[in-house]
Amino acid sequence: PPRSTLFPYTTLFRSISLFTFIFEDEKSVILKGSAPKMSLVFTFVPILSQSPFFENAQVRYATQRKTHKGESTDFEIVCPLSNKAIN
């Protein structure tokens, strides 16, 4: 996509750290990571669902914790693969 299409999400993507990618039974991708705010996790899910490779992404868990820099949210998102991604 053109750079201007991605611009609204640039700040969001810089704020989210992804640590683990798991391919589960060639049917879904599990993403584990952290974000500074829980709201960012729930903003990220619809963006993933709009991808032509995923459908109906869902948060499996999102847990807030205190760090020396403030708060952080650890999360796991399940992204079922679309037919386009499988074929």
Image (cartoon, rainbow, N blue to C red):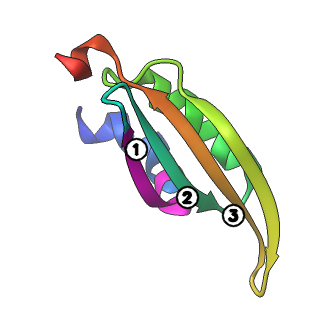
Residue 18 drawn above or below residue 67 = above
Q: Give me the residue at 65% from left, 45% from top.
A: 41
Q: Please give the residue where the numbered disc 1 appears in the rendered image.
A: 7
**Image location of residue 20, percent across then percent down:** 44, 58
Query: Which amino acid type is marked by label 3?
Result: Pro
**Numbered badge on residue 75:** none
Which one is in front in this view, the residue at disc 2 or the one at disc 1?
Answer: 2
Task: Please tell me whether mark 2 sits on a helix, a strand or a loop.
Answer: strand
Q: CA distance from mark 2 to mark 1?
A: 22 Å
Q: Please give the residue where the numbered disc 2 appears in the rendered image.
A: 33
Q: Give me the residue at 57% from left, 40% from top.
A: 77
Query: Does the segment drawn in magenta span residue 46?
Result: no
Q: CA distance from mark 2 to mark 3?
A: 11 Å
Q: CA distance from mark 1 to mark 3?
A: 20 Å
Nearer-N-terminus badge (2/1): 1
**Numbered badge on residue 36:** 3
Q: Is residue 10 left or right of residue 67?
A: left
Q: Which quarter of the rendered picture does the C terminus lie within?
A: top left
Q: Residue furthest top?
A: 83
Query: Does the segment drawn in magenta span residue 13?
Result: yes
